[in-house]
Amino acid sequence: MRRLTVVQLLPALDAGGVERSALEVAAALVGAGHRAIVVSAGGRMLPQLDAIGAEHAPLAIGRKSPWVLHHLPALRRLCAQADIVHARSRLPAWLGWWALHTLPATQQPHFITTAHGLNSVSRYSAIMTRGERVICVSNTVRDYLLQHYPQTDPTRLRVIPRGIDPHAFAPAPMPDTAARARIAQLYPQLAGNGPLLLLPGRGTRLKGHADAIALLTQLRASGLDARLWMPGAQQAGRAAYLRELEQLAQAAQVTDALAITAPTDAMREAYAACDLVLQLSRKPEALGRTVLEALAVGRPVVGWDHGGVGELLRQLFPQGAVPAFEMSEMARRAGMLLAQLPTLPVTMPYTLDAMQEATLALYQEIMDV
């Protein structure tokens, strides 16, 4: 492949799956000798982008304001240098679409989109189906697009799941007493010999924290000295939601067995310390990265069987796929998995290398058209 210039468009570089994927693809491009440019408003992940050797164009193309149109001339200049423009979010995709279509037809770069989520169905969201190729991060996303945008040509859709770095989430012994001890030192309410449950997720009702507290309550009522850690639920600006969770825990009398904390950067150790990982999102998700990370570390996962989470569990760990919102079945399944360590996947097909290779192969495909 000749040296390419690929411009990725996203709102910011703060945190999240969109940002991580952009950095991972930029790293693969630079590693293969290509030029990688990321257009965003910047953020705390910018030093990582710089360390990769990619370029950053600081344009706030995700800002929902008429002022965002002032970035079109600069974006047009970037598009004029590019072989491929790869949009990862709706407003940046619209701006990129408009910018590249102001160029002469012979100078227009190829346009690719990635549908990272199950966005609301609208003409605004439909821009994510306009790529010459549309990357879907799961079969769930592909099916969603074809259902709600039936005019979409299915031959343009490519399922390229996000992958994990197997070194960053290497298997841990079960149990990992050292990891549990370190976590218990940080959060004494998690100490003890009983099972530790883990629900990672930001402080929003959609992540199912109330369901996790209900599950903890049922397990403790059955005689298990279960504990629950919810890293990420404690967030700035979410004080009211935090009080709501604390009140639920007090009413269920499980406060002494619960830690609701800020996010942790040591996710592998968090998985290693626990006995069972929960994925209880109330709204179907596009993929469910938690499932992949936890299984890679060697920890069973239970989750609601819908969206991308259900797709992954049915494929990799069907014992963990529970019909959505059936709490009694969730408690039964969790108790069964805690009573006897189940057989976990031997290999993890969803790796970072596989995602990077598939994306670069797609770039080559579009250049050969």
Image (cartoon, rainbow, N blue to C red):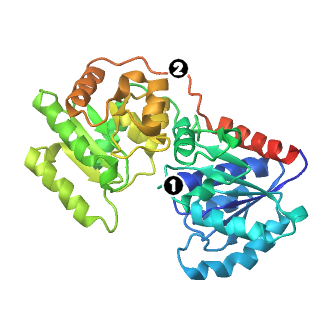
Mark 2 belongs to which amino acid? Val
Which of 32 and 80 lies nearest the eye of the viewer?
80
Q: In which quarter of the image is residue 6?
A: bottom right
Q: Residue 197 at what x, y percent from top left?
A: 29, 36
Compared with 4, 214 (above or below) is above
Q: Nearer the viewer, residue 131 or 152?
A: 152
Where does residue 66 sit, x and y in percent of width and height?
57, 81
The residue that appears at 46% across and 41% down in the rendered structure is: 288
Residue type indicated by callout 1? Gly
Left or right of 247, for residue 82:
right
Residue 183 showing in the rendered view = yes
- Label 2 packing within 10 angstroms: few (<14), some (14-19), many (20+): few
Q: Quadrant of the N terminus?
A: top right
In the visual, does 90 lie left or right of 302? right
**Could you tell me which residue is drawn at 86 percent across and 45 percent down?**
369
Task: Single out the mark in the foreground, 2 or 1.
Answer: 1
The numbered mark at residue 346 is 2
- Local packing at callout 1 (Cα closer than 10 Å; few below 14, some 14-19, many 20+) is few
Q: Position of residue 174 (x, y in %)?
A: 38, 25
- Using the rendered view, name the quadrant where residue 93 is placed: bottom right
**Residue at x-position 55% and y-position 74%:** 63
**Nearest the eye: 296 or 146:** 146
Residue drawn at x 54%, y 79% as measured from the top left: 65
Residue 16, label in figure: 1
Image location (x, y in percent) of residue 41: 60, 71
The image's mark for residue 68 is: none
Q: Mark 2: which secondary structure? A: loop
Helix, strand or loop at mark 1: loop
